[in-house]
Image (cartoon, rainbow, N blue to C red):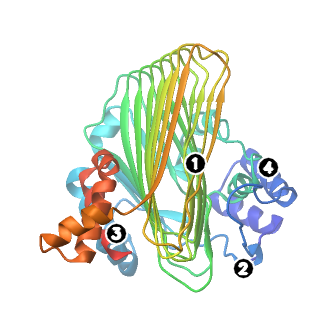
Amino acid sequence: MEKLSEDLIRKISKSKGEPEWMLEFRLNSYKKFLELDNPSFGPKLDIDFDSINYYKKVGNNTDDWKNVNCGIYNRFKSLGVVDAEKNKLDGVTNQYESEVIYHNSRDELKNKGVIFESSDDALRDHPELFQEYFNHLVKYDENKFTALNGALWSGGSFIYIPKNTKLDRPLQSYFRIDSVSLGQFERTIIIVDENSELSYIEGCTALSHSQNSLHAGVVEIYVKKNAKMKYSTIQNWSRDVYNLVTKRAICDENALMEWVDGNVGSKVTMKYPSCILKGDNSVGNSISIAYAKSNQILDAGAKMIHIGKNTRSNIISKSIASEGGTANYRGTTKICESALGSKASIKCDTIMLDDKSISDTIPKNVMLNDESTLEHEATVSRLSEEKLFYLESKGIPESKAKELLIMGFLSDFKKELPVEYAIELNRLLKEI
């Protein structure tokens, strides 16, 4: 394991055959990482940066599973990723450790002019388009972990949907960590051009170890005029992973951005998917869940920034805390002076399953004009004893009754998920 240094960054960039401007970007990001402290808000981050393995490549990117290491193939097969590709998706990218190891898409995508590649391949194959959108929405110097991503980014997806294009099926990326103390730093860029639509789904898992791993991804999404974008995630990192992700979208006139964000796993999560509603009549929606159990801190939420006139945003956050876990909502909604006639709604609901668990709602709501409306509602409650008693009186065991009540609590979220991910969520909730 080689420690983080300029030499390591130069080796990574050279091994990828990157242009000089990217190496310079990486080195500037590394310098900023050394200067910046951990975020001043949220959970305490006790990360030993000297113990992280910052780059591990296992095999080359291929479009044929026969060329993938048998053990890795079996891992993705057991996760359902291989079977999902056959009938339900227009394309997939699967990342193992630091690099994409399998990527494939239907021929129809190419015929439509869609670009769907790993971000490393896009830098090589579409350098001008890549550089136009890379590091413009999420700057490397925003915080310590965007700087770390800038220095070490590897893998992730690059997607461009041309004008007037709608895909029949979603695109999917799946990220897997198996190594001890690995750092994974994918970079995803998505551009949905005018009058187009895209549904993108993302899965994340890791093998459990006694030492901590780090996931610090960056996602930049551009939703052009009259376009629609839906980004669905189920995160099931093991309980030794620090999950520190920056995800942001910018919406032009009449554009729609939807975040569907499930957080079931990790040691610490800090994730606040964001929408910048720049264009008039643009819409941003976020619906999320966080289920925290023993030794887990899930600090999640959303950010909505209204700039254009008559913009709308809706945030729904569902949190569950049990066995002493911490599930917090943290978010920002800002309606700027220019955003006349805009509407924003925030609804945060939390269920506490015991006396040891913790949940806080930490909103920042800013209203800068008097022609708009902003509503915020928050509730914290315990699992209904009356409903539990009713179900048990019908002969349903207590454990099953609790499961049914939790599933009902999350019903709004599950409706927004692709079917196979809703099924996976049910399975995960039964396991944890």
Where does label 4 land, which residue?
Answer: 24
Place of residue 170 in the rendered image (x, y in percent of width and height, measured from the top left): 32, 45
Tag 2 and tag 3, C-beta contact below 8 Å: no
Name the kind of residue labelled 1 in the image: Tyr
Place of residue 301 in the rendered image (x, y in percent of width and height, measured from the top left): 54, 48
From mark 2 to mark 1, how far is it between C-alphas?
27 Å
Residue visible at 58% across and 56% down?
Answer: 360
User: In the drawing, what numbered circle is on residue 272?
Assistant: 1
Q: Vertically, is 224 above or below 29?
A: above
Labels 2, 3: front one: 3
Where does label 3 land, which residue?
Answer: 428
Tag 2 and tag 1, C-beta contact below 8 Å: no
Where does label 2 land, which residue?
Answer: 51
Name the kind of residue labelled 4 in the image: Glu
Name the kind of residue labelled 3 in the image: Leu
Kind of element beneath mark 1 = loop
Task: Report whether 6 appears left or right of 135.
Answer: right
Name the kind of residue labelled 2 in the image: Ser
Tell me which label, 2 or 4, sits earlier in the chain: 4
Q: Nearer the viewer, residue 263 or 192?
A: 263
Tell me which label, 1 or 4, sits earlier in the chain: 4
User: In the drawing, what numbered circle is on residue 386?
Assistant: none
Label 1 Cα crowd, 10 Å radius (few <14 / some 14-19 / many 20+): many
Tag 3 and tag 1, C-beta contact below 8 Å: no
Q: Vertically, is 346 above or below 253?
A: below
Tag 2 and tag 4, C-beta contact below 8 Å: no
Tell me which label, 2 or 3, sits earlier in the chain: 2
Task: Report whether 37 appears left or right of 94.
Answer: right
From mark 2 to mark 4, how far is it between C-alphas?
25 Å
